[in-house]
Amino acid sequence: MVAMFIKLHALIAIDMSPDQKEHWDRTYADNPVFFGNEPSFIARRAMELMKEEGCREVLELGPGQGRDTVHLAAAGYNIAAVDYSPVSCQQLSDVCDNVEAVCCDIRQGLPFPDRYFDACFSHMFFTMSFRSWELDGMMSEVYRVLRPGGLMFYSVRNHKDPHFRKGNHVAEEIWEKNDFEVRYFCEYDIRKLAQRFDLVSIEEFEEGPLPRRLYAVTMRRPSR
Ligand SMILES: C[S@@+](CC[C@H](N)C(=O)[O-])C[C@H]1O[C@@H](n2cnc3c(N)ncnc32)[C@H](O)[C@@H]1O
């Protein structure tokens, strides 16, 4: 009986939290520069290495309103940017001419050919409300669309973040606060996700007034 109640309660709790896609749409519609205009720490890091390696074709996952995308595009990269929020895709198209904004749910796969991109970049995308199997599936897709030797840069919030284990528990290490569902990572999670890649570095950084505490991860698809 108690087990049944807990199970039902958990289901109701999850159902009560707003759909994350709609939540992002509303957030972006209400706040035209939600994360600011400055490029993130990880975008600056990624641009240094992409320049050194002569990258051209770059995939961005979860660009939001494009605070990093505009800087990547200005640096001359050909960008394909994928976000499931139609508001994000519209706002991105308004601010960047030379970016292909693709509106789709990345959990359903990436609509690009194998080995197409020199690099993949994503700031605070994998730290969204994804279950382990969804993370594994999306990382396999990133591996597929990267050329051998291609680079993968991503950031996620970590266990030192002030919001870790605060608010409502959703599942696994996912917590909901102010209607945002966020997954928090430890180093073990990063190494597990890197299985098919060569892990180049894990760096810690902070962002925003909270401040959010994040890992910046660099990986490479092996050359062979
Ligand atoms: C925390 S925001 C980061 C936005 C941007 N990278 C930045 O740092 O300014 C996460 C973004 O991922 C997008 N997103 C979340 N889940 C998604 C999914 N399953 N498929 C595609 N985009 C998704 C959201 O719409 C949102 O724009």
Image (cartoon, rainbow, N blue to C red):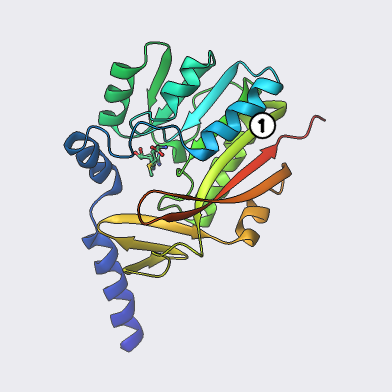
| 159 vs 66: above or below | below
Rendered-image quadrant of the N terminus: bottom left
Q: Secondary structure at mark 1?
A: strand
Q: Residue furthest bottom?
A: 1
Residue 146 appears anywhere in the view: no
How many tags in the picture?
1
Q: Residue furthest left?
A: 30
Rendered-image quadrant of the C terminus: top right
Residue type beneath disc 1 = Leu
Q: Pick the residue in front: 43 or 221.
A: 43
Q: Pick the residue in front: 160 or 16.
A: 160
210 left or right of 187? left
Q: Pick the residue in front: 64 or 147.
A: 64
**Residue 139: quarter of image:** top right
Residue at mark 1: 151
Residue 206 appears anywhere in the view: yes
| 45 vs 80: above or below | below
Residue found at x 25% / y 30%: 87
Residue found at x 46% / y 50%: 127
Residue found at x 39% / y 21%: 101
| 189 vs 13: above or below | above
